[in-house]
Image (cartoon, rainbow, N blue to C red):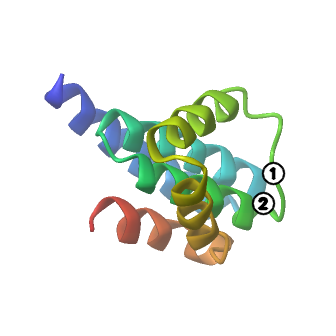
Amino acid sequence: MAGDLVAARARQDQALELAVGSQDAPVVGAVLVGVADLALRLGRPAAAARLLGAATGVRGGPDHSVLDRPRVEAAARDALGEEAFAEAYAGGLGYRLETAAEAVRVTLDA
């Protein structure tokens, strides 16, 4: 399982690099939701909440077209509780397209 998560992280990093290069904010936001899911699988629900906030910040609002988002958000919220989730989520809202890769580095590599 750990090897799968390492490979998943490498693929998510590659997807984020390509998405940022496309300058397509909704695509970058969708990738950030995927990275948030990975954070959950790594046992880091606060990182997941922050990355969900970053996805919203990059896009400029919530993206209801990413089908995994409600599941990831609910799992992070359940793990953290409402107050801690809201605080972590708010911590990601300041990220924009240009700083999306930084959001992942700061959040997952901390």
Residue 51 picture location, percent across and down: 54, 56
Q: Amino acid at mark 2?
A: Arg
Residue at x 30% of width, y 40% of height: 43
Tell me if I can see residue 24 in this picture: no
Give the residue pinned by disc 1: 62
Residue at screen point 61% across, 33% down: 74
Question: Which mark is drawn over residue 59?
Answer: 2
Q: Is residue 17 left or right of residue 66?
A: left
- In the shown orientation, is residue 63 left or right of residue 88? right
Q: Secondary structure at mark 1?
A: loop
Residue placed most toward the observer, 76 or 68 = 76
Residue 63 in the image, given as x and y percentages of width and height: 81, 45
Which residue sits at x=62%, y=27%? 71
Q: Residue at x 60, y 50 (%)?
A: 82
Answer left or right for 108 relative to 14.
left
Locate residue 11, reporting x and y percent.
Answer: 38, 40
Farthest-out residue, top: 1
Residue 2 visible in the displayed image = yes
Picture quadrant where residue 79 is located: top left
Return the mark for residue 108.
none
Tag 1 and tag 2, C-beta contact below 8 Å:
yes
Report the front residue among 40 and 96.
40
Q: Mark 1, mark 2: which one is toward the viewer?
A: 1
Counting other residues with Cα less than 10 Å from the Cα at mark 1, is it few (<14), some (14-19), or many (20 or more)?
some
